[in-house]
Amino acid sequence: MARENFEIITNNPLVLGKLEKTHYVAYHEISYEEILKKVRDRIHEGHRLLSHPLSGSVKPKETPYKSIIITKRKEMKPDLESLELIENAIEACGKFSFKADLYGAEVYKDFQLIDWTLLKSALESAEI
């Protein structure tokens, strides 16, 4: 899928910095869970997930950053599989709590890198 056919929704500033000139990136300074809810809203508008909302072995709220790929084009009605995946991710996210005060700035850079690495792998599949 060509990069003009999808968009990335993220709260990760590293992703924005790496991709803003080459991809459509919707960057939001919001929480991990709020990113999931923003993606859910887009799915209700007719967009479809192109990357799994719980990709990798990182549990929800083990990291503050999340990047998700969705279709740019909207369908007439919501994709039920995408909707089920995002709703399950939101539910799973509610079972965890993120302890922001436990981490220093360097750990946040590591969290950004983990999210970027997962997204980069998904992008390689999406751009084939």
Image (cartoon, rainbow, N blue to C red):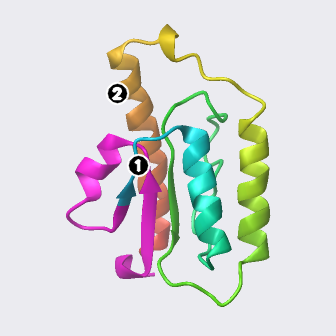
> The N terminus is located in which quarter?
bottom left
Vertical arrangement, residue 16 with respect to residue 46, above or below? above
Q: Secondary structure at mark 2?
A: helix
| Residue shown at 78% from the left, 31% from the top | 95
Residue 75 located within the stretch drawn in magenta: no
Residue hosting label 1: 28
Residue hosting label 2: 109
Q: Secondary structure at mark 1?
A: loop
> The C terminus is located in which quarter?
bottom left
Residue 9 located within the stretch drawn in magenta: yes
Mark 1 or mark 2: whose residue is earlier in sequence: 1
- Where is residue 44 shown, x and y percent of the image? 67, 72
Between 27 and 128, the one nearer to me in the picture: 27
| Residue shown at 44% from the left, 51% from the top | 10
| Residue shown at 62% from the left, 87% from the top | 75
The answer to which image quadrant residue 24 occupies is: bottom left
Q: Amino acid at mark 2?
A: Lys
Q: Is residue 119 visible?
A: yes
- Where is residue 88 shown, x and y percent of the image? 79, 51
Task: Tell me which segment is drawn in magenta.
Answer: 1-25
- Where is residue 94 shown, x and y percent of the image? 75, 35
Classed neighbour count for the residue bearing mark 1: other residues with Cα under 10 Å, few (<14), some (14–19), many (≥20): some
Q: Nearer the viewer, mark 1 or mark 2?
A: 1
Classed neighbour count for the residue bearing mark 2: other residues with Cα under 10 Å, few (<14), some (14–19), many (≥20): some
Q: Is residue 128 visible?
A: no
**Horizontal arrangement in the rendering, residue 7 relative to residue 45 (left or right):** left
**Horizontal arrangement in the rendering, residue 11 relative to residue 18 (left or right):** right
